[in-house]
Image (cartoon, coloured by chain):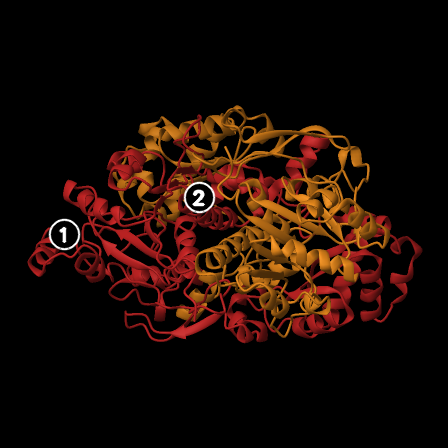
Chain colours: A orange, B red
């Protein structure tokens, strides 16, 4: 079975992480994503983790994940022959996605006006830190910098400490995920309306109006005049918050209306909560009651592992999540049985597993067709499909317009 | 003017919380007609207000603005229509009410489904089953319907029925033990909702991909998203580090996971602050230096102080190995500057930097202003004029922005019942009397 997007060709001029994550979703669901790599390759090839720490531009764990199922064409867009090849590929593409600094596409002679002049129904999505039109358009960014500015980092962490970010490149991955919707929208307009549009996607904007609290903190302070601050030293609510247990931590939310419904069953000690006061929906606002409850609860937690707490919570329909380490996720039979992990093997990285399908489609499932491409692995193949003869490809290679692996 | 990309597509929105609700605002921004299905007798937790529908004035007087900050600190008549956690997720949508717990309500829902393209939901497993909203039933209403379900852990496996919000499933997938202060423990991680973002955007992507396929083949399909599994891409370097090298990563605060690859120093440093942390007046600058050239640029921006000239700081490996020193010294320097002043100065020098922007300053930022990211408008309820988020991106040839202000509960009952379903006036009145049509939650809902 082919993916839902198997009739789509994406010309992908993005690099690093946000852009490639957006186009990865297309490749993973069947589209032919032709990754145009600049001479030397996508800088993400130099990002770890590497197998046994051995640096190898064909062995980056980051590059692998963000580029599965794509094809790589090494093209020098600064050479006239390279640009000519770009136009030949654009002729066959349904959408172009680019992630250069704003203005570079125009400098290269492949800017929006020229694309639109040559092919009216070909959309262009430009991904950049702050957008094509902004007082900050030439500014640099990083996961940290863009999340600090755009996302709700200021209120994350503890009040007496500095604000603290999410893991790794989570913010860029979120932006890449949102980017996929912009590309999809552009495809619809191109295919069904015959109108190619230029979408200016700013990573900062995707957080400034994104869903993880930023919209809410901006509205909250306008509405009420009250800011959203980093909380003081961690505390727990009534059966709510992070708790230590025998072998780690659990995150629970069983207060409010859920408390009356589930707490007795969850703990297995109805006698602790025999008093009628525990049925009062406002009991969670009573600090003395929370203290009394914690007297039972902390001892109960220390007798149980995080998995045992979660099992009891599932039975009692209490919201809960044990805090797993990555190796615990890896060893977990539930995720393995469900097919979360996908096996792969490459010469540089050996055999390993990586997170596979992001969701399941009954008619057009996710498919791992090929590992991330080697630099220029598909240059000759893609150029041949675009009508170049073997001799022409040799000439392009000789003048340095393309590189073929 | 061109149409919006999803013009003519109709989505039945049974979703909730942030993941489902943000997914449909993305689709609505792209031009889909999103019909939010609501019920005056059923409270969808964390979807229009927290913790209850009928907030008291007392509940709005204290607490963080984003959780309890109602307009003018007053819940008013219909707090569910303008709660700060949710109002921004209702632009460009339609809302109608129907009690789908009753057969007549399911019949009405079926009629709406019959004229729609896709249905989505993200409740705990069991909720839709109890109502009878299954893929089979939906297909009886419309053969090529697309149905997406996004429960926390999917539709099989031992965690299938686990109750969860996005924050908890992130913890299960490793995020709580991967993020936070280097010297802290997870109890110092305040709550974030990263999983809602990734799930929402890929719910929207998946539905569009399925519509694309349906347009090609005439076939609908069933989509299952386990939100926990979907969240994994945000932590993928840690997963790869484990599967390639057996390394279990630990929190590194604001430092880069790519320090060894060139990204150091990387951190958040204090700036001149007009007030205290407790006032939210603490100012910080985020800085990431990548590679030797940017290190040289930072040195120059700092005036090339003596300590930066040490040989061991001139290589990527040296900077990666000496981040404690770098962070301390850079912080000593930044604290004398205003955050925006440093922002401009460092960016002009070619160093990635930006203020850690506290929410009350967002609307005054020149970038936010230049890009019209927030728009001043009135909603139907009389709460005054406020600036609401606009779409994440625009299609410049199409009518974009906020085409319809954040929708109130049941605001489009007329449109759905009279225009789409062509219900007579008498029938409409009967459905009001029967409790299907309403514009406020029933008093039985807390």
- B67 left or right, relative to A348: left
Look at the numbered disc 1 and give the secondary structure of its residue. loop
| Residue B223, horizontal then vertical, whole percent | 42, 38
| Above or below for B270 versus A21 | below
Q: Are marks 1 and 2 on the same chain?
A: yes
Q: Which one is in front, B108 or B80?
A: B108
A219 lies left or right of B378:
right
Q: CA distance from mark 1 to mark 2?
A: 39 Å
Tell me the tag on residue A51: none
Dot 1 crowding, Cα within 10 Å, few <14, some 14–19, many 20+: some
Tag 2 residue: B213
Judging depth in this view, the residue of B49 and B196 nearest the camera is B196
Residue B435: give its label. Answer: 1
| Residue A184, horizontal then vertical, whole percent | 50, 53
Residue B73 picture location, percent across and down: 35, 68
Q: Residue furthest left?
A: B426
Closer to us: B357 or A2: A2
| Chain holding disc 2 | B
Q: Nearer the viewer, mark 1 or mark 2?
A: 2
Q: Residues within 10 Å of mark 2 (few under 14, many from 20)?
A: many
Query: Can residue A13 be seen here?
Result: no
Q: Quadrant of the C terminus of chain A?
A: top right
Compare residues A43 and B199 and report the one nearer the observer: A43
Residue A330 visible in the snapshot: yes
Give left or right: position of A247 versus B291: left
Disc 2 is placed on an element classified as: helix
């Amino acid at each position: 079975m082919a993916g839902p997007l198997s009739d789509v060709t994406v010309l992908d001029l993005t690099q690093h992480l946000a852009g490639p994550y957006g186009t990865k979703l297309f490749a993973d669901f069947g589209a032919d994503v032709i990754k145009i790599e600049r001479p030397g390759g996508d800088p993400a090839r130099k990002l770890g983790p590497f197998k046994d720490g051995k640096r190898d531009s064909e062995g980056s764990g980051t590059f692998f994940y963000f580029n599965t199922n794509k094809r790589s064409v090494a093209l020098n867009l600064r050479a006239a022959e390279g640009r000519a090849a770009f136009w030949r590929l654009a002729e066959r593409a349904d959408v172009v996605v680019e992630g250069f600094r704003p203005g570079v596409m125009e400098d290269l002679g492949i800017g929006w006006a020229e694309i639109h002049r040559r092919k009216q129904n070909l959309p262009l999505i430009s991904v950049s830190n702050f957008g094509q039109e902004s007082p900050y358009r030439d500014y640099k960014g990083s996961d940290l910098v863009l999340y600090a500015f755009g996302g709700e980092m200021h209120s994350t962490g503890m009040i007496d400490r500095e604000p603290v970010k999410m893991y790794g490149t989570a913010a860029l991955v979120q932006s890449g995920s949102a980017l996929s919707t912009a590309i999809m929208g552009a495809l619809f307009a191109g295919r069904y309306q015959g109108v190619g549009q230029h979408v200016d996607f700013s990573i900062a904007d995707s957080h400034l109006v994104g869903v993880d609290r930023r919209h809410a903190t901006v509205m909250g302070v306008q509405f009420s005049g009250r800011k959203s601050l980093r909380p003081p030293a961690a505390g727990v609510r009534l059966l709510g918050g992070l708790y230590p247990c025998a072998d780690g931590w659990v995150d629970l939310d069983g207060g409010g209306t859920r408390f009356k419904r589930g707490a007795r069953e969850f703990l297995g000690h109805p006698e602790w909560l025999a008093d009628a006061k525990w049925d009062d929906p406002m009991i969670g606002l009573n600090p003395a009651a929370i203290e009394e409850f914690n007297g039972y609860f902390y001892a109960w937690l220390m007798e149980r592992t995080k998995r045992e707490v979660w099992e009891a919570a599932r039975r009692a329909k209490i919201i809960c999540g044990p805090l797993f380490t990555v190796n615990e996720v890896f060893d977990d039979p539930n995720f393995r049985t469900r097919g979360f992990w996908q096996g792969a093997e490459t010469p540089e990285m050996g055999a390993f597993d990586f997170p596979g399908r992001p969701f399941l489609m009954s008619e057009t499932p996710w498919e791992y067709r090929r590992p991330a491409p080697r630099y220029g692995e598909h240059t000759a193949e893609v150029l041949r499909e675009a009508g170049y003869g073997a001799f022409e490809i040799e000439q392009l290679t000789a003048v340095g317009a393309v590189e073929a692996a | 003017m061109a149409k919006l990309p999803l013009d003519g597509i109709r989505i039945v929105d049974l979703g909730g919380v942030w993941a489902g609700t943000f997914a449909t605002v993305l689709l609505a921004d792209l031009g889909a007609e999103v019909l939010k299905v609501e019920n005056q007798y059923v409270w969808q937790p964390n979807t229009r207000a927290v913790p209850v529908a009928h907030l008291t004035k007392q509940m709005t007087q204290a607490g963080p603005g984003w959780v309890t900050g109602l307009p003018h600190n007053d819940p008013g008549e219909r707090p569910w229509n303008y709660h700060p956690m949710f109002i921004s997720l209702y632009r460009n949508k339609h809302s109608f009410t129907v009690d789908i717990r009753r057969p007549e309500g399911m019949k009405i829902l079926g009629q709406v489904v019959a004229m729609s393209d896709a249905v989505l939901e993200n409740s705990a497993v069991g909720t839709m089953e109890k109502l009878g909203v299954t893929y089979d039933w939906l297909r009886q209403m419309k053969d090529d319907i697309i149905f997406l379900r996004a429960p926390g852990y999917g539709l099989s496996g031992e965690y299938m029925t686990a109750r969860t919000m996005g924050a908890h499933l992130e913890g299960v997938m490793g995020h709580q033990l991967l993020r936070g202060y280097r010297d802290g423990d997870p109890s110092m991680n305040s709550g974030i909702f990263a999983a809602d973002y990734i799930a929402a955007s890929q719910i929207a992507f998946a539905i569009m991909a399925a519509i694309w396929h349906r347009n090609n083949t005439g076939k609908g399909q069933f989509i299952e998203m386990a939100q926990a599994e979907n969240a994994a891409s945000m932590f993928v370097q840690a997963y790869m580090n484990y599967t390639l090298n057996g390394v279990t990563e630990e929190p590194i605060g604001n430092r880069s996971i790519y320090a060894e690859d060139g990204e150091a120093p990387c951190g958040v440093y204090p700036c001149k602050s007009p007030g205290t942390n407790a006032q939210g007046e603490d100012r910080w600058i985020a800085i990431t230096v990548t590679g030797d050239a940017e290190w040289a640029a930072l040195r120059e921006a700092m005036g090339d102080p003596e300590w930066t000239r040490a040989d061991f700081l001139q290589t990527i490996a040296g900077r990666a190995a000496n981040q404690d020193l770098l962070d301390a010294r850079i912080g000593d320097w930044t604290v004398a500057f205003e955050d925006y002043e440093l922002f401009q100065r460092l960016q002009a020098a070619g160093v990635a930097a930006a203020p850690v922007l506290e929410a009350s300053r967002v609307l005054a930022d020149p970038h936010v202003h230049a890009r019209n990211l927030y728009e001043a408008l009135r909603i139907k309820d009389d709460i005054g004029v406020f600036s609401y988020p606009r779409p994440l991106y625009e299609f410049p040839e199409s009518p974009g922005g906020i085409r319809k202000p954040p929708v109130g509960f049941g605001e489009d009952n007329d449109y759905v019942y009279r225009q789409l379903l062509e219900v007579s006036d008498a029938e409409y009145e009967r459905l009001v009397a029967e409790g299907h049509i309403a514009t406020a939650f029933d008093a039985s809902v807390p």
